[in-house]
Image: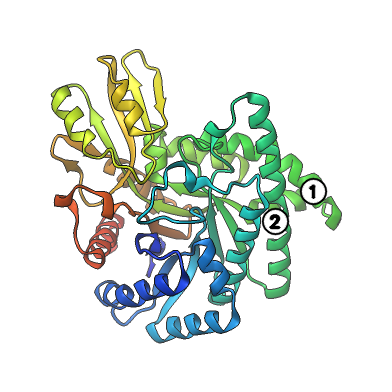
Amino acid sequence: MITPYGHLTYCSNIHPGEKWADHFQSLRDNIPYIRQQLAPGQSFGLGLRIANEASIELSKPEVLLEFKNWLTEQDVYVFVINGFPYGGFHNTVVKDDVHTPDWTTTDRLEYTIRLFNILAELLPEGMHGGVSTPPLTYRLWWKTEADKQLATESATNHVLQLLDKLISIEKETGKLLHLDIEPEPDGMLDNMVDFVNWYRDVLLPKGITHLSKYSFSEEQAKETILKHIQLCYDICHAAVGFENPEEILASLNEIGIKVGRIQVSSALKVNFSSEKEIKLKAIETFNEPVYLHQVVSRNSDGTKSHYPDLKEALADWNENQEEWRVHFHVPLFINSYGVLESTQGDIIKTLALHTENPFSSFLEVETYTWGVLPEDMQKPIGESIVREIEWVKKILSYE
């Protein structure tokens, strides 16, 4: 839906279905109710998640036409696609496979090109659109600094091949599409500092050379890269790394990097200043086997400890750890979970900065862990989505 601060939607990765027919059925089952509750009589924007298998099916002209007709009937428009998870995302163990295949592979490139071809067909006239994607690769797969450097170079080369496709789409259709790269703990681009450093020191120099084949000047090449390669700003991920939104925006502005979308999401926070044992038992209930739940600990000496999953953090807990941030996309509208807290305050601060000086056209709610939350926190999916978006509208303070 359209707000004074950009298009506000949710990501359909909350709905199961790796095959297009299954996911489409989930959309048909849920979207009419959600739209009626949130935007009666108005157009409703959707952040679409399309798995690889679904992308192959949806690329068929007759299947895509059926979906386009349904969108028109429902007065729903698609302007962003979640291209981070390639394969199974529900009812299976995901963990670090959420990065598979990574940007060192042609499989990831070909999948992302399919998503952009689909988005070019679905995107309303006059709008730009983006596809989110992983932060190049999973850092822990690469054992040495030399290996990490080679992986980064390989991934960057594939991103630049995608850039060629985005330039071609804009030339042929007039539609501006952008890849929205999403830093995540333990990604090769673990945080916003990593992302900005890679963008400045690797992507721009390689990209300017790559685009010389179009006879672009250095300035034209830089502007083309800045236009088509953007940031997916996931508030949960930034909060897990204890990152400051004001510093993030300052670092982006210094180079001119655009924010393709703000993913409005919340992490778990554990303050160990009191009731340590009780809080450890409470956070242990979130140690589930499906998704990665990276942990960053702020320690009493000012250092930070990083753990690839909650299991490792629980095993290594010690008295010097003052606060944990846990990558677990908990509901936005809940600030505390008994003795545990959320990083809701980071959302409020980030959106306050956005309302003062909007830095993206798109806001996408991305709470996808409803099925693995403790039972007392689970609600019907449609109702949950409505509550999430209503809360964001309240924080944006335009109603």
Kind of element beneath mark 2? helix
Dot 1 or dot 2, earlier in sequence:
2
Q: Which of 314 and 172 is in front in this view?
A: 314
Residue 316 seen by the camera: yes
Give x and y (percent) for residue 143: 59, 26
Relative height, residue 323 to residue 163 (above, below): above
Relative height, residue 242 to residue 372 (above, below): above
Q: Dot 2 corresponds to which residue?
A: 163
Residue 197: which numbered mark, if any?
A: none
Determine whether, in the image, residue 15 is placed left or right of residue 135: left
Determine whether, in the image, residue 280 is placed left or right of residue 40: left
Q: For the point 54% across and 75% down, which residue is it?
A: 122
Residue 11 seen by the camera: no
Mark 1 crowd level (few <14, some 14–19, many ≥20, 10 Å Cα):
some
**Mark 1 to mark 2: distance in Å?**
10 Å
**Quadrant position of residue 326:** top left
What amino acid is found at the position of numbered circle 1 in the picture? His
Give x and y (percent) for residue 296: 37, 29
Q: Which of 250 and 300 is in front in this view?
A: 300
Give x and y (percent) for residue 185: 45, 36
Q: For the point 44% across and 75% down, which residue is it?
A: 21
Q: Nearer the viewer, residue 125 or 387?
A: 387
Q: For the point 40% across and 58% down, which residue is it?
A: 364
| CB-based contact (under 8 Å), mark 1 and mark 2 | yes
In the rendered view, how is the structure colored?
rainbow
What amino acid is found at the position of numbered circle 2 in the picture? Leu
Give x and y (percent) for residue 175: 63, 70
Q: In which quarter of the image is the C terminus?
A: bottom left
**Quadrant position of residue 293:** top left
Q: Dot 1 corresponds to which residue?
A: 210
Mark 2 crowd level (few <14, some 14–19, many ≥20, 10 Å Cα):
many
